[in-house]
Amino acid sequence: MALADELILAIDQGTTGTKVLLFDRKAEVCGTFYRELTQYYPRPGWVEHDPVEIWEGVVELIQRAMTIMEEPRQVRAIAVTNQRETVVVWERATGRPLAPAVVWQCRRSTEICRALREEGLEETFRRKTGLTIDPYFSGTKMRWLLEEIPGLKARAAHGELCFGTIDAWLLWNLTGGKAFATDYSNAARTLFFNIYDLDWDDELLAVLGVPRATLPEARPSSCFYGETVALGKLPAGIPITAMIGDSQAALFGEACFAPGMAKATYGTGTSVMVFAGPKQIQAPPGLVATIAWGLGREVGYAYEGLINVTGATMQWLRDGLGIIEDVAESSAIASRLSGNDGVYLVPAFVGLAAPYWDMEARGLITGLTRGTTRAHLIRAGLESIAYQVRDVVELIRESGGLGLTSLRADGGAAENEFLMQFQADILDVEVVKPRIKELSALGAAYLAGLQTGFWADLQEIVATWRAERVYHPRMEPELRERYFTEWKRAVVRALTRPGETRKL
């Protein structure tokens, strides 16, 4: 039966695929449409996407979504949420991409980051952007593109290019090139956006060699960005009223509006984010400070712990080692074991991010014996996700920052019962799984709806939020600490270079 009510259409463009979802006034999902995205690995440590494939996938999904509506004008507004630090460069005159999209996971700018650190610039970047110098973030990817692609630097200097994260790329195409903008949450991931002045920082732009003229205008996450051009069944004139990075969108979708509320988004990697409120913050070493969202004139800040590889670990066990056919089976397989028998997997496939920030760390498996089975490796993979989340939470606790009494969990791996129970056990806090699974899309939809009056205020949004299940910690304290101590020993091994000695 076709839908008759007004709807918010949310585009959720992620690392491994794109979704388009429809939400009604009760924040219920009325339709979900998905398409996978091809991953390209041209060299070890490099990860790329095809920007045209991303855009064509969005158009296809929008067409599919429009088929279940009675009237195209039922779309009240469009919201965009996206993989954050991934960079696209395109020709301003034609909108033609000039290089593959460089994905947030890509490590090609490692040498650039090393040189910036050796110049003693770490504190300068951290003080202004809240970030650490790492290939994870967009700025050094842009510098690499300018330096390595012939002619790009000269064209950038003449204002012929557009650099943007995925939100800016989609907005450009949705509006037929009329709007070139990004939101504060995505701008905050570039390494050259001053999160306190809310503007591109000229000093950092000069360091990275990125001309200001190539960059989009930065705006609040909830605001009027432009109107659509006609795209097949989608009519022209539909307002685009929200753009926000996927992790921040999930924080908003989890209704984490009070300082100290926290969520973990379990995807290819994992983002642990704690809302800090409107007060400007400085994160302790190991964490980053970031903009959570811009809502009207008010900006919210957050502490974030970034984990490079979590869900991707299970994909590696499936696709790389071939020891599991379906990741969904991992919960039942891991649950068959009474313990981990000392087997630990440190998934430092592209280095380790928070709280270690070691670009050169490499993965390892420790504790193998003749009694080790595939079940042990599968369990070790799931446990590694929970341990890395605790690494971040421990840093928050030790820094005297905001305390955590519970953790709201979303993303694909939040459906894994073994992982969620183990996460509660190893953290010793409740882990709460919401009723609605698509939290990034929901958060973006909320922001779009607030701008258009679809929802009145934050209180109305809080009233729509519901928990589906709460996982309570039940592990004995002695076992909890033994497991975590052994994990830390394994991490030390992953961080240790030949000839070095490191302590726990």
Image: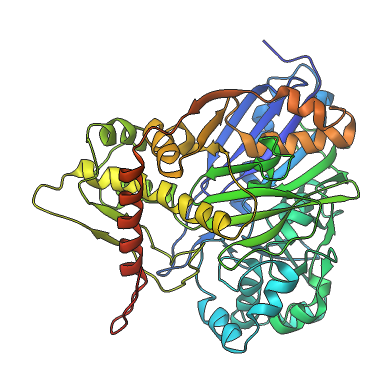
Q: In this view, does 336 lie to the left or right of 406?
A: left
Does the rendering let one see residue 49?
Answer: no
Residue 295 percent across, percent down from the top left: 84, 45
Q: Is residue 416 left or right of residue 393?
A: left
Residue 59 percent across, percent down from the top left: 68, 40
> Residue 379 is drawn in which quadrant?
top left
Give the residue drawn at x 68%, y 20%: 68
- As drawn, the residue found furthest toward the top would be 1
Relative to the observer, which residue lies in front, 308 or 233?
308
Q: In this view, does 96 lie above or below 426?
A: below
> Residue 43 is drawn in which quadrant?
bottom left
Relative to the observer, which residue lies in front, 42 or 26?
26
If the image is split into quadrants, where does the N terminus sit?
top right
Residue 443 percent across, percent down from the top left: 71, 37
Does the rendering let one see residue 212?
Answer: yes
Residue 204 percent across, percent down from the top left: 75, 78
Q: Is residue 153 above or below residue 225?
A: below
Q: In this view, does 56 lie above or below 19?
A: below
If the image is split into quadrants, where does the C terminus sit?
bottom left
- As drawn, the residue found furthest toward the left would be 370
Relative to the observer, which residue lies in front, 355 or 271?
355
Give the residue drawn at x 33%, y 33%: 331
